[in-house]
Amino acid sequence: MVRNKLLLGLLSALLAVPGAYAQTMPAGAAQQAANAVDPASIQALKDMGAYLQTLKRLRASVDLTGERVLADGQKLQHTATASLDVHRPNRVRAVMHSARSHRELFYDGATVTLFTPAQKYYSTVPFSGTLEELARKLEEKYGVEIPLSDLFTWGTPAAPVDTIESAMNAGQDFVDGDLCDHFAFRQRRIDWQVWIASGGKPLPRKIVVTYRGDDARPQSISLIDWNLKPAFKDSEFKFVPPKGATKIEIVPVKSK
């Protein structure tokens, strides 16, 4: 049981890599009302979400940078990468790499599997539902987060925009050569920014999240690359245990 709990801790760290980055506002932006909700910025977020929901097959790759805050307030920066192959409505494979771990997640519409290649441990549980439902249930029951799980909820009732307290257009920037519209939002204890590709394919190319609940204001940064015509086969969503792999039971998180 101790080993199972340790594995769950490792598996639940799929996205536990916060990031450091400071964006300088364009001239004049500071004069905008700090708590104003710009309707055009909200509409841009809705348009992005609506477009994402039209994508049935995609591959998204992300470079993650994050900050861990020590007890004395000092920040340590860490990096990781993740990739997602998605076939809506109910198939996903996620691969997560960092210097400390390598984790994989498979969902074929009937079974979800968490796998740690280094230890060759895997946990499998039956599940049927959409990707948005999968992301929610994994986090609620097992404390496991799927990288970029917001991709499954943007543009759906699960991601309401009426909780946004502040929304502004912060101008334009280039992200890896792509001209993007830069928007900044405030929700509850989080400030977040998104750079959305200009033109007919409003894909999120960069996301920065600042955690205001911590006085140190740690940040996470995600740089996202997209392949909208991936060549993967549906067979890759089904986990096949490699030789020598050991199946273990995943332990649900304790209810508070």
Image (spheres, grey):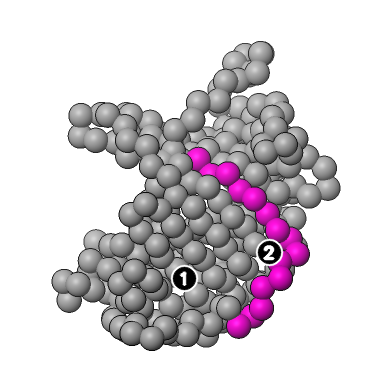
User: Which image quarter: residue 20?
Assistant: top left
| Residue type indicated by callout 2 | Leu
Identify the mark at residue 247; answer none if there is no mark.
none
Mark 1–mark 2 distance (CA, rounded to whole Å): 16 Å
Image quarter hosting the C terminus = bottom left
Residue 140 point in image, percent of width and height: 38, 65
Q: Image height check: is 113 above or below 50? A: below
Assess disc 2: are there few (<14), some (14-19) or many (≥20) residues with their C-alpha within 10 Å of its C-alpha.
some
Residue 81 point in image, percent of width and height: 49, 52
Assess disc 1: are there few (<14), some (14-19) or many (≥20) residues with their C-alpha within 10 Å of its C-alpha.
many
Decide: marks 1, 2 in contact (CB < 8 A)?
A: no
Q: Residue at x 70, y 32 (%)?
A: 174
| Residue type indicated by callout 1 | Leu
Q: Image height check: is 34 above or below 80? A: above
Which residue is labeled 1 in the image? 105
What's the magenta region? 221-235
Which residue is labeled 2 in the image? 58
Give the SS element for disc 2: strand
Image quarter hosting the N terminus = bottom left
